Image (cartoon, coloured by chain):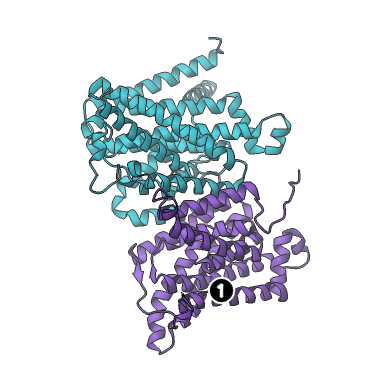
Amino acid sequence: MGSVYALVALGYTMVYGIIRLINFAHGDFIMVGGYTLIFTIPVMLGFGLPAWTAIAFAVIVASSVGVATEAIAYRPVRKHGTRMSALITAIAVSLFLENLAQVLYTSNPRVIRASIFKLPTLQLGNVKIDGTTLATIAIAAVTMVLLQLFIHNTKMGRAMRAVSEDKEASILMGINVNRTITATFAIGSALAAVAALMYCAQYPSVMPTMGSMLGLKAFVAAVLGGIGIMPGAMIGGLTIGLVESLSKAYSASLTKGIITSAFSDAVVFAILIVVLLVKPAGLLGKNFGEKV
Amino acid sequence: MNMPKQNKKSALINAVALAVLLAVVAYLGFSRALSSYLVGIFWLSCIGIIMATSLNLTNGFLGQMALGHAGFMLIGSYSSALLSLAMVRAGILAGGGAEQLARFVICLIVSGLLAGLFGILVGIPALRLRGDYLAIITLGFGEIIRVVIQGIPWAGGDGLSQGSASPVLFKTGLGFNNATKSHYMLFVGLVTVACVSAIYTFIRSRFGRAIISIRDDEIASSASGIDITFYKVTTFALSAVFAGIAGSIFAACYSSLNTGNMGFMASVNYFVMVVFGGMGSLTGSIVAAIGLTSLNEALRSFDEYRMLVYSIVLILMMIFRPAGLLGTYEFSLSGTISHLRNRISKNKQEKEAQV
């Protein structure tokens, strides 16, 4: 689960880093990816291909939704709005996607019947590790390495870093800011689609509101690691996943049933509150003074 | 009283208008002229008005984006339901009629104060942050409140939540039936008017001017000697007090409480009211609260499409009119009257000039 959070948190961090906007709709891009998987997995199986190849469609659909959102909603608001109105737009987009899915596919969860990864369980002494879990971790690791290479070694990656550092200056340096932002959204949503595949491999059901809680927790992860910082997002995501699993598993027995597993959501938010109070810049962040 | 003549006159006009409005509500309520459906809409509108105007205090006037307002409403509704239950069990003011009214009043006050207390507790850490972070942290606090109340066995767990224990709220002495609800229309109307006027006078006071200056420029106002943290936390707590009162009315309005109804979506719902009406306009919040509540009820059968339409309207609004329908405009009865009078006398003068 931690690696799913890490991937989603990466998307949050990229978008926040570049336009300073918490993209509330990011969690819903996962949902979009999930529904795409629901419809494309049977098709892929029909062609005799393994189920995970459906990810290609999920990535394409989620990216186009992300880019469309940016072009239709965020860009006009960014042009002549305040940060508050941008944030409201993000919430509205999230509501829109969730309710659209609800209208189209009803609010009942849909189940993916095919298993996405057909892998044997790994046995290490007494510890059994599920093949799916291993595949999830492997995919997350590969994606993150690829992303790091992209950000540091390509022209577009450099442009992204430049825009997030100083937008005005990068315009002067001849960077097409709007195109860079669009690319960021495309990559961020693609990451969300990959996260959707990994999520569905673990919990094979999809529903319209699946993204909202997942998105919020991933946001907590992004803040924990230091928002706008990519390795931070990975560390944050893994930490949140770990904390959540542990609090689910042990909180009831440790506190003799007073704190039940239902509190794990509260624990995640409590982490957010503590981080924001103690070290608002996140684990890997640096503090900046405010310019007057 | 040492009021200028103009203020005295407008106060008189407003008082008369309010009295007429409340008299109509009283007549409708006591004669039971309205169907239970319309009475329900009246109650929900009052709750919506209190919630939206109090949220506007934080979002519009203080300029801090809070997304956990329903959490305080949740505290208010559960505390007043539990308090009422305890009082009925202990036999204090357990009867109907005047005793019931007294119990309701006590519940309102206590739940308001309790929500305010939590407002201070949440506000002190949360308001050190700004903008997006504040939105997320208040959202987080709202969820924590919800999860905790849900988890406490004697509150949310199975005590007052929906399902098999559904009629349980009747036993607490709140959760009014339709006849009682109609009977209490005047009281709820009065509470709403009191809350809105309190918020209005608060904004017009020295304190209110201070928080508006914080909204407009935090650094400049702190340089002018305004204690920013104190003002922010107080405003936040005050808005929580009103949310608690609204929650208390909510507990009286429904036959069961459910934490699921007052989660993130409820906060967003009230937030939408504030944004639609205009951040910084109480009139806007009131109009939006009444309008959206009635619309919600009228469009029950299109429930799914309703949120879809809201979100689209919200996006369009942010693109084309980010200030909301009314911006920061406040409706003033005396102002409108004098405006009309000026116009009439102008017309007269023009006619006389023509003659």
Q: Is residue A100 above or below residue A33?
A: above
Q: Residue at x 44, y 86 (%)?
A: A50
**At 45% across and 53% down in the image, what residue appears?**
A254
Q: In the picture provided, is B249 more to the left or to the right than B63?
A: left
Instruction: Give the amino acid at mark 1.
Output: Ala
Q: Position of residue A77 (x, y in %)?
A: 58, 55
Q: Quadrant of residue A11?
A: bottom right
Point out residue B26 in the picture as x, y percentages from the top left corner. 29, 24
Q: Residue furthest top?
A: B1
- Determine the image quadrant of residue A109: bottom left
Tell me where residue A17 appears, x and y as whole percent.
65, 60
- Horizontal side of A21 relative to B21 (left or right) equals right
Query: Horizontal and vertical percent for residue B127?
Result: 59, 40
Q: Is residue A84 visible?
A: no
Q: Camera-side residue: B115 or A137? A: A137
Is A272 above or below relative to A30? above
Q: Say if residue A10 shows up in the picture.
A: yes
Chain identifier matching the cyan colour in the rendered picture? B
Q: Residues within 10 Å of mark 1 (few under 14, many from 20)?
A: many
Q: Nearer the viewer, residue A158 or B292?
A: A158
Front-most of B210 and B339?
A: B210
Q: Residue at x 74, y 59 (%)?
A: A166
The mark tally for this picture is: 1
Q: Residue lying farthest front?
A: A125
- For mark 1, name the chain: A
Outermost residue to the bottom? A48
Q: Which residue is mark 1?
A: A140
Q: Secondary structure at mark 1?
A: helix
Toward the viewer: A277 or B253? A277
Q: Which chain is assigned purple?
A: A
